[in-house]
């Protein structure tokens, strides 16, 4: 049994406490969930030895600071392999299809997020997309934000959201991932990332029937399909730190 499956089994029995989430978005993984990606942490990863089994296949060295031992993928872990539709392009996108071709950033979000956490996640991916275009490595990059709210996040909604956030869908490297159903999204997030997604009452927010407590995780994955950095405090992680990490991975 590998480290993540072992920890996930502990979490299921209550031996490993999950992060506490609020009604809108949790924003960051709690201290029990692992890493610290604050500016003084060197973009920290989140295992005691700073790496999974594939750490020798990474380009970035170990982070300066580590904290906890989370259930989600960390530096040196293989990115979980799954396929999810891109409702805008009509393609089925697999996380494995980029191996040997592109490094990518992955996160999860929903467009109705009421407290600014999801826009902050998308901003970080979009900024890297901008830099990739400016510096000529857009064809070596991909961006895979996954919505766990397929009931509301239709192709039209996602297209409008991209326009509002300044995402360049015409670049050919941005894919909104949308599971076929809410249940499929819940299963995907739990099995692959150890993150629990659950609808909660959204009545405290204006015009929002339901919301989701969730976590601001961003993963940077290299061309070998190995996680280079996990940013569990994604919305609080300096944008330019992520840009620099991604640039180093792509141009090494």
Image: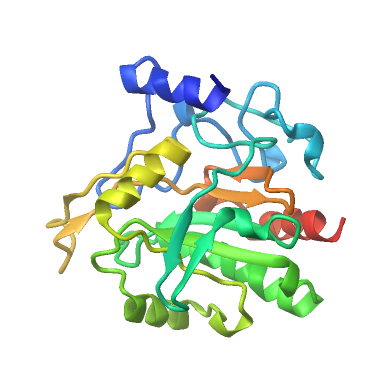
Q: Nearer the viewer, residue 194 or 217?
A: 194
Res 170 seen here = yes
Is 79 left, or right, of 13 in this rendering? right
**Residue depicted at 81% across the width and 55% down the height:** 248
Task: Residue lying at the far right in this picture: please name it.
Answer: 252
Instruction: Please name the residue shown 58% across and 70% down the image.
Output: 126
**Colour scheme shown:** rainbow
In percent of width and height, residue 22 lies at: 29, 43
Query: Would you say 4 lies left or right of 210 here?
Result: right
Which residue: 38% across, 14% down?
15
> Residue 165 placed where, x, y %?
48, 76
Rendered image quadrant of residue 28: top left
For the N terminus, the quadrant is top right
The residue under the point 25% across, 44% down is: 198
In the image, is residue 108 above or below residue 85?
above
85 sits left or right of 93 in the view: left
Residue 73 placed where, x, y %? 57, 37
Instruction: State the image coordinates of residue 137 (x, y, percent, origin top left).
Output: 78, 71
Q: Quarter holding the C terminus?
A: bottom right
């Amino acid at each position: 049994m590998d480290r993540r499956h072992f920890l996930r089994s502990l979490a299921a029995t209550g031996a490993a406490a999950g992060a506490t989430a609020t009604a809108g978005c949790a924003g960051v993984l709690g201290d029990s969930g692992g890493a610290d990606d604050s500016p003084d942490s060197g973009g920290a990863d989140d295992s005691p030895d700073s790496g999974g089994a594939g750490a020798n296949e990474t380009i970035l060295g170990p982070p300066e600071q580590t904290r906890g031992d989370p259930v989600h993928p960390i530096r040196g872990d293989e990115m979980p392999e799954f396929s999810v539709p891109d409702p805008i392009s009509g393609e089925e996108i697999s996380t494995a299809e980029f191996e040997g071709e592109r490094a990518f950033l992955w996160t999860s979000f929903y467009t109705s997020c009421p407290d600014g956490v999801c826009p902050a996640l998308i901003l970080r991916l979009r900024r890297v997309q901008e830099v990739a275009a400016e510096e000529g490595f857009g064809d070596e990059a991909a961006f895979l934000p996954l919505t766990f709210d397929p009931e509301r996040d239709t192709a039209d909604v996602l297209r409008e959201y991209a326009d509002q956030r300044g995402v360049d869908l015409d670049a050919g490297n941005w894919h909104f991932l949308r599971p076929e159903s809410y249940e499929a999204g819940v299963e995907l997030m739990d099995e692959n990332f150890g993150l629990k997604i659950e609808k909660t009452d959204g009545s405290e927010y204006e015009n929002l029937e339901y919301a989701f407590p969730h976590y601001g995780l961003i993963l940077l994955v290299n061309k070998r399909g190995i996680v280079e950095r996990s940013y569990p405090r994604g919305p609080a992680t300096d944008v330019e730190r992520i840009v620099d990490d991604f640039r180093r991975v792509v141009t090494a």
